[in-house]
């Protein structure tokens, strides 16, 4: 069973700062990685996917993947109060039949 | 393009009753997965269906069951409800076979068992 580990937080950052969220995974053979954002009382929303080592940027979001160290990060630049949510890291299980989720990191952005 | 549709959005049931939840995936998506989310346990995998076949099942008791129809719509059923079944039940669909390309989640069904 693959494991995905995240710090539960909360991670508190001031508005305009960079928020850095981290995730480690147990299966060295993992090929794809996903970040979901979940607002309180809502369902998870896919915000980033990354498949190759290095950085992938999408607007204020950057995903970073380091397969050798088995971690994936999400950076949020110019954090806004509307970014306050729980961020879930997910990795497909062997056979790609399900996503294994971390417990999520709660991010709080203060005005 | 319509997203993943789950019905109903909210449900209150009494212990011992049974419940059926419905999910319509994004048009063209053939893989449907179900998750249970609770504050203490996070997102727990229930089952995954592809082309009407259950390919994977999580560690849940037999009271939890599901099926997928030929149009890819899916239902899950929980019989003999317990208080601990109170949770947000999420359906997710993906375009390919399973989770390789990630999921799109529906809005969920919040089940409260009293």
Image (tube, grey):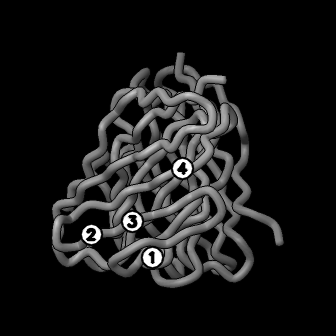
Residue to which mark 4 is pinned: A76
Name the residue located 57 percent from the left edge and 55 percent from the top edge: B91
Residue B98: image tag: 1
Q: Nearer the viewer, residue B112 or A79?
A: A79
Circle nearer the N terminus (3, 4):
3
C-alpha distance separating marks 3 and 4: 11 Å
C-alpha distance separating marks 1 and 3: 24 Å
Mark 3 touches mark 4? (CB < 8 Å): no
Residue to which mark 2 is pinned: A66
Left or right: A36 with respect to B38?
A: right
C-alpha distance separating marks 4 and 2: 18 Å
Q: Quadrant of residue B42?
A: top left
Residue A47 in the image, given as x and y percentages of width and height: 58, 59
Residue to which mark 3 is pinned: A64
Q: Secondary structure at mark 4?
A: strand
Q: Nearer the viewer, residue B65 or B44?
A: B44
Left or right: B108 with respect to B18?
A: right
Question: Would you place residue B80 above or below residue A110 in this image?
Answer: below
Mark 4 touches mark 2? (CB < 8 Å): no
Name the residue located 26 percent from the left edge and 60 percent from the top edge: A71
């Amino acid at each position: 069973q693959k494991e995905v580990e995240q710090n539960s937080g909360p991670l508190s950052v001031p508005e305009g700062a960079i928020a850095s969220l981290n995730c480690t995974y147990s299966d060295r053979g993992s090929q794809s990685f996903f970040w979901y954002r979940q607002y309180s009382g809502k369902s998870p929303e896919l915000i980033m996917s990354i498949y190759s080592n290095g950085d992938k940027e999408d607007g204020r979001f950057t995903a970073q993947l380091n397969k050798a160290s088995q971690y994936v990060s999400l950076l949020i630049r110019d954090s806004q109060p509307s970014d306050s949510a729980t961020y879930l890291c997910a990795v497909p299980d062997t056979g790609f039949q399900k996503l294994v989720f971390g417990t999520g990191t709660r991010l709080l952005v203060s005005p | 393009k319509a997203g993943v549709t789950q019905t109903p959005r909210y449900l209150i049931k009494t212990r011992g009753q049974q419940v059926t939840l419905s999910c319509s995936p994004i048009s063209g998506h053939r893989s449907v997965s179900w998750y249970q989310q609770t504050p203490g346990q996070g997102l727990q995998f229930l089952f995954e269906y592809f082309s009407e076949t259950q390919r994977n099942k999580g560690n849940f008791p037999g009271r939890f069951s599901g099926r997928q129809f030929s149009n890819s719509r899916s239902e899950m059923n929980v019989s003999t409800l317990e208080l601990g079944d109170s949770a947000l039940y999420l359906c997710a669909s993906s375009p390919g076979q399973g989770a390789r390309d990630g999921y799109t989640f529906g809005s969920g069904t919040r089940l409260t068992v009293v």
